[in-house]
Each structure stands twice: as structure tokens, then as C-alpha cells.
Amino acid sequence: MNRREIREQIFKLLFRAEFNEREEMDEQTALYFDTDDNQDALLDADYIKIKLFKVLEQLPAIDQMLCEKVKGWDIDRMGKVDLTILRLAVYEIIHDVDIPEGVAINEAVELAKKFGQDNSKAFVNGVLSKFTAKLL
């Protein structure tokens, strides 16, 4: 799988965290890879799982950063898809040194186009631009 496909797999698993307790994520991950739709991801399952659990570990800090950057928006008011995309992208921007910030933002916008609503790509891009404004 290429990086975009791997990121999409991580996004899908991270989305499950919205509906399951943290303690259930090992089981949810096993179920995810056990379905026929996700057999292609098995080759990269170790990397996907490692990154997923790294993101989950950082969720409280990521959510706090999102709340600080997005004035007037509570993360509970955000759409679950947009929030999941933002969480993954913020993790990549802040913690994943192998992914350039511009790539993390571009890939988040692509996920928003594919899985979000009509205004998701603009919302995701606008929020993430606040994380890189210091570089501009």
C-alpha cells in the first residue's frame, strides 16, 4: 500500500475510536483486519496499528491543541469525520517527523474530500493552517 492508502486505513480505525472505548480498540483493530474489505492492509497492519495507538495515546493533548486553535468551536460540536481527520493530521504535524507539514495538510484535505461533507475540506484546511501559521 502507498502512504495515502495507509493513512486512509489509520483514519478508518481512528474513526472507530469515536464509538468505542479505548480498551476496546485492540479488539476493534483485530475485527477491522479480519474483514475481506481490509485484506490488502494486512501487509502494513503492524505499521497501521503502531501509528493508530500512537495517535490514540496523544488524543488528550491533540484535542486540547484543537480547542486552543479553533476559537468558538468545541470538539464535541465538530463532525466526527472532520474531527478524526484533524486529529490524525495534528498528530502528523506535531509528532511525525517523517511527514512534512504540507503533506499532512494536503492528505487531510484529501481525506476530507473523500469522507467529509461539502464544507469539510475548507474547514479542515482552515483549522490546520493555524498549526503551521508560525512557519508562513
Image (cartoon, rainbow, N blue to C red):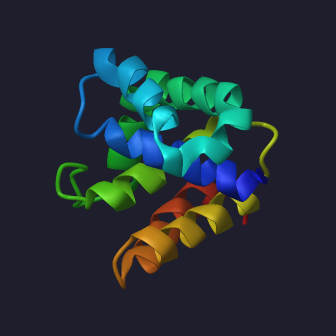
> Residue at position x 67%, y 46% from top?
40
- Which quadrant holds the C terminus? bottom right
Image-based side of 126 in relation to 68, left or right: right
**Quick check: can you spot residue 126?**
no
- Percent of width and height locating residue 108: 57, 62
- Percent of width and height locating residue 72: 22, 61
Number of residue marks: 0
- Percent of width and height locating residue 17: 33, 35
- Percent of width and height locating residue 94: 63, 39
Image-based side of 119 in relation to 1, left or right: left
Taking 39 as reference, is 106 above or below it?
A: below
In front of the other: 88 or 24: 24
Q: Quadrant of residue 39?
A: top right
> Residue at position x 62%, y 30% from top?
51
> Residue at position x 39%, y 74% from top?
120
Taking 33 as reference, is 37 above or below it?
A: below
**Residue extending furthest toward the top:** 23
In front of the other: 114 or 79: 114
Taking 54 as reference, is 73 above or below it?
A: below
In front of the other: 115 or 37: 37
**Residue extending furthest toward the front:** 36
> Residue at position x 36%, y 85% from top?
118
Q: Quadrant of residue 54?
A: top right
